Image (tube, rainbow, N blue to C red):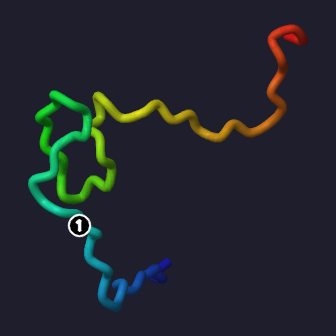
Amino acid sequence: MTDTVRGAAIKGVSRPSKRFSQDRVCSKPGCETRLSQYNKAEYCHAHAPIRFPRVRGKILDEQEA
């Protein structure tokens, strides 16, 4: 077997990463954590509001379980 499989290089220009303003600080009063220019959030990880992922399937009430 001398057949080989070859791929082609991806061509074209990739889009640059979106940037936000530099020297941003967490919005929580008293927190001095600097945020990355690539982080779109206004809070640092420690003060970010809790977000729950979308749950698929049937959600049972506590009484049914």
> Residue, x 50% and y 77% (percent of image)?
1
> Residue, x 58% and y 38% (percent of image)?
53
For the residue pair 48 and 14, the one nearer the viewer reads as 48
Quarter holding residue 57? top right
For residue 43, side relative to residue 6 (left or right): left
Q: Residue 48 at x, y = what percent?
A: 36, 35
> Residue, x 18% and y 47% (percent of image)?
35
For residue 21, side relative to residue 9 (left or right): left
Q: Residue 29 at x, y = what percent?
A: 21, 31
For the residue pair 32 and 12, the one nearer the viewer reads as 32
Quarter holding residue 30? top left
For residue 1, side relative to residue 56 (left or right): left
For residue 16, side relative to residue 21 (left or right): right
Q: Residue 22 at x, y = what percent?
A: 12, 59
* Residue placed under numbered mark 1 in the picture: 19
Q: Residue 41 at x, y = what percent?
A: 33, 49
Inspect the image, locate mark 1, and give the three-letter code of the amino acid beneath it: Arg
